[in-house]
Image (tube, rainbow, N blue to C red):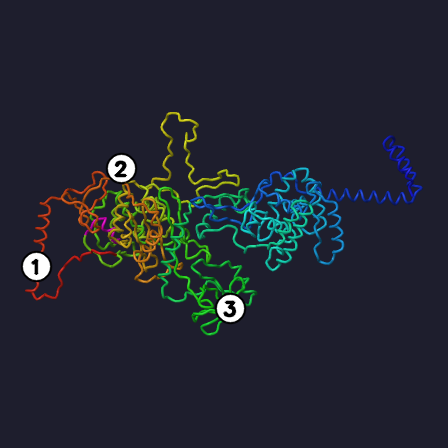
Amino acid sequence: MIELANLDYAKARLRNDPIVLRDWFLANWRENRWFRWISSLGGAAVALAIVLWLVLASNLPDADSLLDYETPLPTMVRGGDGEIVHSYARERRVQLQYQDFPTQLIESYLAAEDKTFFSHGGVDITGTINAAFDYITKYGSGERAVGGSTITQQVAKNILLGDEYSVTRKLKEMILARRIEDALSKQEILTLYLNEIPLGRRSFGVQAASQAYFYKDVDELELHEMAFLAILPKAPERYGRRQNQELAVSRRNFVLDQMVDNDFISAEDGEAAKRLPLGLRPIRSAHASVDAGYFLEEVRRELIDRFGETAEESGNSVYAGGLWVRTSLDSEMQDAARNALRAGLMRYQGGRGWGGPIATIDMDAGSWASQLASSYLSIGYEDWRVGVVTQRSGNNGRIGFSDGSEAPLSGMPDALRIGHVIVASPSGNGYRVRTVPSVSGGFLAQNPQSGRILAMQGGFDSRLGDFNRATQADRQPGSTIKPFVYATGLESGMTPASEVPDQTFCYYQGANLGEKCFRNFDGKGGGVHTMRWGLEQSRNLMTVHIAMDAGMPNVVQTIDRVGIGDYEPYPAFALGAGDTTVKKMVSAYSALANHGRQRAATTIDYVQDRRGKVLWRADNRKCTGCNMAEWDGQPMPRLQPAGEQVLDPRTAFQVIHMLQGVVQRGTAVVLRDLELPLFGKTGTTNGPTNVWFVGGSPDIVAGVYMGFDQPKNLGGYVQGGTFAAPMFKQFVSETRDRWSDEPFVAPPGIRMVRIDRRSGKRVFDAWPTDDPRADVIWEAFKPDTEPDRSTRLDEIAAKRDEILDLIRRARDADASRSRGRDDEPSDFVEDQGGIY
């Protein structure tokens, strides 16, 4: 054995004379066998440690990166009133500062996980030795050993390394823990830990877990609840389940005992907390969400296009960047839009019977409950539920739901089969089959002054499919296109009082297509009428005449300028043959209501990062001088008008004024009893395959259509005035307090003149009344376009011509009878009054 005296001598000589030490080492190496063994083992251990250090430590993440680490946070969405309406999150995460964590909550985690946290340097040697011994004893058993990790090591694992179960990961974790202790303070380490630790129910961090398990913020937690959260890092999926409550209570009480032993709480407080139940709440979504799935999905798509989806794509990504998004969503109007569209679709579905399954599940391909749950199909209408038919016997069977439960099912149609996914509602001691309307549609409401979309419903329920018919469905708008044909006519020199023939119009399309003739919706026509009357009664022939007189290239240019669509200059497009969307039509009508100025339709007002910095704003106008510290005596700064002037303001007002007549005595007369200053236009396409209404007030414009996704005949009784306009009416009725009684204001350059609405002649001896059927009305004209004055002599001359015409007809009839031709009918013009 090596003598201690020699070791002392060696140490002394090492400090004073390395050569003597070398000679001493060589002499002992030659003469002492034990010295050679110990020296070889020591050298090998040192070399192994150096190699291991180089291998493990060379490629480790930089601990200093934690100084700039950003916790992945979900995007929070606010409505127009500032209230949170939704979040885009795949995990529950909320970031807090150290001072936000209650002291007893911190002490709970120290007692459960790392009671020496404030004294060790990142690694607890005693805990590491115990963990190593436990690993050796369990090696090969398949059972996972205890971790023995300090809180600092868990930060290294959760943020920098990952959860690989291996010895090398544990060694890397220990190295990183020492580096983290050098880079961060203890408070900073605890903040990262309490914000990042996975705690079950898809929650990361104590604030998210507090909401997930107790529906509370951390500052509202009681002692026993804090102790429960502190047991979750060990096994969150086990302790967080109701069936394991006894196990969870036992572990929670152990943590409370540890808190007493460490003088964090008194023994009395510990015993009182141990007597309380866990008090876990049922699982629920991270944030309450308004029923605006189509609107929120539109917002999500726009955010992903602008900021990216994940942290790898952008630091301000939708699912990790912690964005705060202010939207234009109006919850009250959204509910009304949803209700109105659903009511119209249900009304059409009526007694048509079962419309078929929502989807089909292969009952032989594994658990039907798992397949149903993974489909994410659900419905939010009344008390309806989505389920799958699991059994059938005659007219009765059983329905299964995504939670695995089953119930009796009645009212089963003949075509219903096992595996069909359907909707059903409670009935007696079971459920009864219900029908989701096979017809669909879209509804959208917008503020015409700002372009902000207030409500959007793209189908019966977004939970059944995310195809948004308000923004994605291209449909023929039918007669809702006509106001822009009339606007083109007005800009080409016509007036609302101009007389237009309501007569067949044919034109030659070429050798291949031959002659094309147009007719009115009701197949009738004849005479000459004012432009106003043609728009109010939606006369196709008058519209075609106006389009051809104004020039179809000019018509399609107007349609394109307001954003409806880019069409070829064919007359059919003047009657709504081109495809467009509800969103585009509402935006175009908003330009009419806003004196011809069109604002881009938006769902997002602005986006902020997690610290409140504005990243993007819909209204990016600059206001020079708005932030001056003191008034400089100059005129008050004003923002420039936003949007694009797509129509002459006077033309836009003239069209609006005529469209108010559509509501008062035209195809949308069903809206008249709302007693509001409304304008609008119905639309019904050939078939009919689509029915429309678009219109509103100076402050709100909305549009709706109904039709099958694969266009087919809705039935001859279905028209825009009988189905689409009533949906709009319900929407207004449910939000009546939001609609102003203020009338439309005429822009400069408009002259209001009294005319006879049937003849278009100017009137001087009578005044308009509140009766919508009155002959005399106010009409809007541009300067110097008013009709000439009608005198008494004009009326006498017209009456004389009428009498002479009757005498001439009578004389011709007598002559015909005298020649034996009494069977030939007389010629006459049919009165075209009424609503079509």
Of circles 1 and 3, which is in front? 3
What's the mark number on residue 748?
A: 2
| Magenta stretch: includes residue 295 | no
Going from N to C along the chain, the mark reached first, 1 or 3, is: 3
Say which of 535 and 150 sits in front. 150
Q: Secondary structure at mark 2?
A: loop
Image coordinates for residue 617, horizontal then vertical, percent: 45, 40
Q: Earlier in the sequence, mark 3 or mark 2?
A: 3
Confirm whether residue 221 shows in the render. yes
Please say whether residue 535 is one of the residues in the magenta stretch: yes
Residue type marked 1: Ala
Quarter of the figure with the C terminus: bottom left
How many numbered markers are drawn?
Answer: 3
| Distance (Cα) linking label 1 and label 3 | 80 Å
Q: Earlier in the sequence, mark 2 or mark 1?
A: 2
Give the amino acid type for the residue marked by disc 2 in the picture.
Pro
Question: Left or right of 631: which side holds 725?
Answer: left
Q: CA distance from mark 3 to mark 2?
A: 69 Å
Residue extent of the magenta highlight: 528-540
Which of label 2 and label 1 is nearer to you? 2
Q: Which residue is mark 1?
A: 810
Q: Position of residue 254 (x, y in %)?
A: 67, 52
Crowding at mark 3 (Cα within 10 Å: few <14, some 14-19, many 20+):
many
Quadrant housing the N terminus: top right
Name the residue beneath numbered marker 3.
390
- CB contact under 8 Å: marks 3 and 2: no
The local secondary structure at tag 3 comes to: strand
SS type, badge 1: helix
